[in-house]
Image (cartoon, rainbow, N blue to C red):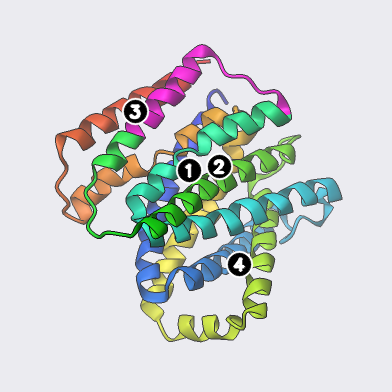
Amino acid sequence: MPLLGELSALLTSFCWAMSAVGFSNATREFGSQVTNRLRVVLALVALILINAVLYGKPIPYDAGLDRWGWLALSGVVGLALGDAFLFSAYRYIGPRLGLLLLSLAPVFGAFAAWAFFGETLSPVQILGIVITLGGISWVVLVRDESGTQNRRDWRKGVLFGVLAALGQALGLVLSKQAMGNDFSPFAATLIRMIAAVASLWILAAFQGQAVKTVKTVLATPKGLRWAVFGAFFGPVFGVSASLLAVQHTAVGVASTIMALPPIIMLPISYFFYKEKLNWQSVLGTLVAISGVALLFLR
């Protein structure tokens, strides 16, 4: 199918915007660490059911050790560490600057794909990346956000934001290494999620937080509902769509299109949260969309 990778990346952006709504509400109920642990468990259960229905086996045991190794490493780097850094960035500098720094992922992704796979981008696609990142940066920067932070917290937040972008980019690049021969994105996401669940919950057990996490979840049904919503769109379909994207197009192109959630959140914020949009946000959105349009040109 022509442009399957680009369209999958666009679907990924929509899914991640929806998951941001769910997880932001869940975080208000649980806190970031509990939400992070819960979401990977919910996603794991959903993915096991999806793989059982689609392929007749809940876990792809026959995927091969090499594929399991790459995808497991991708899960730890991208889903466990990368998202943990992102939540920490939100804590110190808020979602505005956190999302801005996450938009560095296409730059890291394109560089890593060049270093590992020798992928190259056309001049038009490079221009599309620059324009898209410019539009995303513009929209995120003009969004007002209350609250202040001291210089030390600001530096921590910036560092965590950069590490989150690096984790997301490396997670995609590592996944691409294992996505040959049209391997199922749902099966690949399941393997990644198994690694993420194992790493997060083993760490929680060592920290004495595993039982406390379960008690917190059971005592807060409202937060659980929002976490289910976020997991459905994020770790399940969003991550699967992202793997389908990198399977069928260059990592730099896919990761740039997948950096659009801040743009997609604009109409959501306007219609559902009744936030007022200024002209800079609208114009920045148009700039980003024009950049995405360039990425569709081979």
Camera-side mark, 4 or 2: 2
Q: Are marks 2 and 1 in contact (CB under 8 Å)?
A: yes
- Of mark 4 and mark 2, the one earlier in the sequence is 4
Q: Are marks 1 and 4 in contact (CB under 8 Å)?
A: no
The residue labelled by disc 4 is 45
- Residue at point 72%, 52% (across, down): 73
- Residue at point 40%, 31% (across, down): 133
The residue labelled by disc 2 is 242
The residue labelled by disc 3 is 289
Relative image position of residue 85 (x, y in whole percent) = 52, 57
Q: Give the range drawn in magenta.
A: 117-136
Res 296 visible: no
Confirm whether the magenta stretch covers residue 295: no
**Left or right: where 70 falls relative to 208:** right
Quarter occupied by residue 251: top right
- Mark 4 packing: few (<14 Cα in 10 Å), some, or many (20+)? some
Relative image position of residue 26 (x, y in whole percent) = 39, 69
Amino acid type at mark 3: Ile
Quarter occupied by residue 205: bottom right
Confirm whether the magenta stretch covers residue 133: yes
Secondary structure, mark 2, is helix
User: How far is the residue under mark 2 from the one under mark 3?
Assistant: 19 Å
- Of mark 1 and mark 4, the one earlier in the sequence is 1
The residue labelled by disc 1 is 12
- Residue at point 29%, 34% (across, down): 138
- Of mark 2 and mark 3, the one earlier in the sequence is 2
Amino acid type at mark 4: Val
- Mark 2 packing: few (<14 Cα in 10 Å), some, or many (20+)? many
